[in-house]
Amino acid sequence: MIVISVLISCLCLSVSAEIIKIGDIATKGHGVKGAISVYNASTIIVENFEYDGGAPDAFFMVGDTDKPTDGGTLLPYPFEGKFYEYSDDSAPIIQGVHNGSRMVLTLPSDAEVSDFKWFSVWCRAYSINFGDVYFPESFDLSGEPEPEGGDDIPSPIAPVSNDISGEKDHEYHHGDHSDAESEAESHAEHEPQPGSGHTFIPSALLMAALFSLLKL
């Protein structure tokens, strides 16, 4: 029975979510650098973040206007389960100097990444854009698999030392998966291979073994 349970568990493994790279932050001031990726419709990852810590009122912010401006949606970090209005003086600013930090940012429950046009490191006090990334117009996560749980999924309450281990990286380009052939190649590229550190058991063999055990 133990062997049967293991085989059933292997057959029921869910597809893991990809981390999709959107682009590198265009530096505008205060040494802001890094890369922006998306984990799912409500989670943005900031990779290799650099910032000199010298701005008085800096935030991560997203918005749906043509370019970064006042009134966007603040993404507090570290996230402690609360969002803030743009004008709320109690909203936590980006603290300290960063040299290659990795951060998990959570969107409000009524918003998705596809609702926004840009991501910015924004100074609210002086309305200055320190760095930005624009989301592609065709960007859509509706077809991406949603993670079902597990230790490798980012917590919505993200500590300073966020880490998403074991996830697969994929860079977003216009026209990705434009036809069946390119989509098949993409999926094949991310399939676990023998010797890659993943357990590789063909589904047909699992089914055959399962049925053999059930006949015993």
Image (cartoon, rainbow, N blue to C red):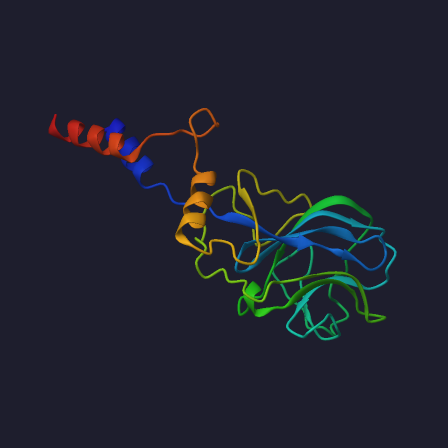
Number of marks present in the image shown: 0
Query: Image point 32% across, 41% down: which residue?
Result: 12
Q: Which of the 4 image quadrants contains residue 77?
A: bottom right
Q: Is residue 88 above or below residue 52?
A: below
- Would residue 148 be seen by someone viewing this image from the given angle? no
Residue farthest to the left?
215
Quarter of the image with the C terminus is: top left
Quarter of the image with the N terminus is: top left
- Would residue 34 be seen by someone viewing this image from the given angle? yes
Q: Which of the 4 image quadrants contains residue 81?
A: bottom right
In the image, residue 124 lies at what x, y percent? 80, 69
Q: Is residue 60 above or below residue 192?
A: below
Q: Is residue 61 left or right of residue 208?
A: right
Q: Nearer the viewer, residue 122 or 154?
A: 122
In the image, residue 58 lies at what x, y percent? 79, 62
Q: Nearer the viewer, residue 21 or 47?
A: 21
In the image, residue 59 lies at what x, y percent? 75, 62
In the image, residue 90 lies at what x, y percent? 75, 67
Q: Nearer the viewer, residue 79 or 15?
A: 15
Q: Is residue 214 above or below residue 122?
A: above
Q: Is residue 160 left or right of residue 125?
A: left
